[in-house]
Image: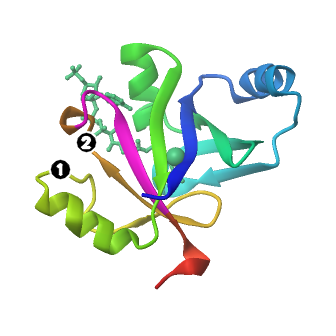
Amino acid sequence: MKRVEHIGIAVSDLEAAEALYTRLLQVAPYKHEEVAGEQVNTAFFRVDDTKIELLQSTDPEGVIARFIAKRGAGIHHIAFEVKDIVSEMERLRNEGFHLLSEAPKIGADNKLVCFVHPKDTQGVLIELCQERDSLI
Ligand SMILES: CC[C@@H](C(=O)O)C(=O)SCCNC(=O)CCNC(=O)[C@H](O)C(C)(C)COP(=O)(O)OP(=O)(O)OC[C@H]1O[C@@H](n2cnc3c(N)ncnc32)[C@H](O)[C@@H]1OP(=O)(O)O
Ligand SMILES: [Co+2]
């Protein structure tokens, strides 16, 4: 794993959360993107060499909506950048971690992503991500 690529934060009102993080970080979001496959709208802020990813559900039954219903808004996942997501997935499977997809999925910001079940990681949802342009 190379570094923390982003921290995902589940929010119920993206516009209000964006305004708040803009005030907090003193920087505007550099990007908005809908990821239909994950049923989310996102806004991204740069913080040094990492990012904050705000996530609002586009579906009342989506994972972000369910997370907020159960736990309230807040930190949803930590994403680690990896060099080769397929081999990292294989390594983690061999280590006994339960991955939430068989293969990498399309994420936001030009990434391939996959998730490790929070039950295997002390209650923290972990995302792996790899830049799509850097595919090996
Ligand atoms: C924008 C695209 C991409 C990117 O490029 O960065 C993203 O970040 S997408 C982010 C949204 N997508 C995902 O999170 C996909 C992976 N997540 C899942 O598949 C599910 O959320 C889950 C982790 C498998 C949980 O789903 P499910 O089992 O259906 O939900 P429950 O609500 O029943 O929860 C079961 C259990 O797990 C706890 N939980 C749920 N989410 C989290 C979380 N983020 N962190 C920690 N724990 C979590 C939940 O509280 C339940 O616990 P118990 O109540 O104790 O059973
Ligand atoms: Co993410």
**Mark closest to the chain's N terminus, 1 or 2:** 1
Residue 57 visible, this orientation: no
Residues marked 1 and 2 touching at CB (< 8 Å) = yes
Type of amino acid under label 1: His
Residue at 42% from the left image edge and 64% from the top image edge = 105
| Left or right of 9, for residue 34 | right
Q: Quadrant of residue 94?
A: bottom left
- The structure residue drawn at horizontal position 27% and vertical position 59%, both measured from the top left corner, is 101
Observer-nearest of 111 and 63: 111
**In the depicted structure, whether residue 62 falls above or below residue 69:** below
Q: Magenta stretch: residue 128 in it?
A: yes
SS under mark 2: loop
Is residue 60 one of those drawn in magenta? no
Label 2 Cα neighbours within 10 Å, binned few <14 / some 14-19 / many ≥20: some
Gap between marks 1 and 2 measured at Cα: 6 Å
**Kind of residue at disc 2:** His
Residue 2, position in %: x, y? 49, 58
Confirm or reject: label 2 Cβ below 8 Å from ligand 1. Answer: yes
The circle on residue 117 is 2
The residue lying toward the viewer, choosing from 11 and 7, is: 7
Q: Which residues are magenta?
A: 121-129
Which residue is label 1 attached to?
98
| In the rendered image, the vertical position of residue 1 relative to residue 61, given as above or below | below
At a point 34% along the width and 31% down the height, the residue shown is: 124
Q: Residue at x 24, y 28 (%)?
A: 122
Q: Position of residue 19 (x, y in %)?
A: 83, 23
Secondary structure category for the residue under label 1: loop
Most extreme residue toward the bottom, as rendered? 136
Q: Nearer the viewer, residue 61 or 6?
A: 6
Taking the image as shown, residue 29 lies to the left or right of residue 73, namely right
Determine the image quadrant of residue 90: bottom left
Please indicate whether residue 17 sits to the left or right of residue 128 in the image: right
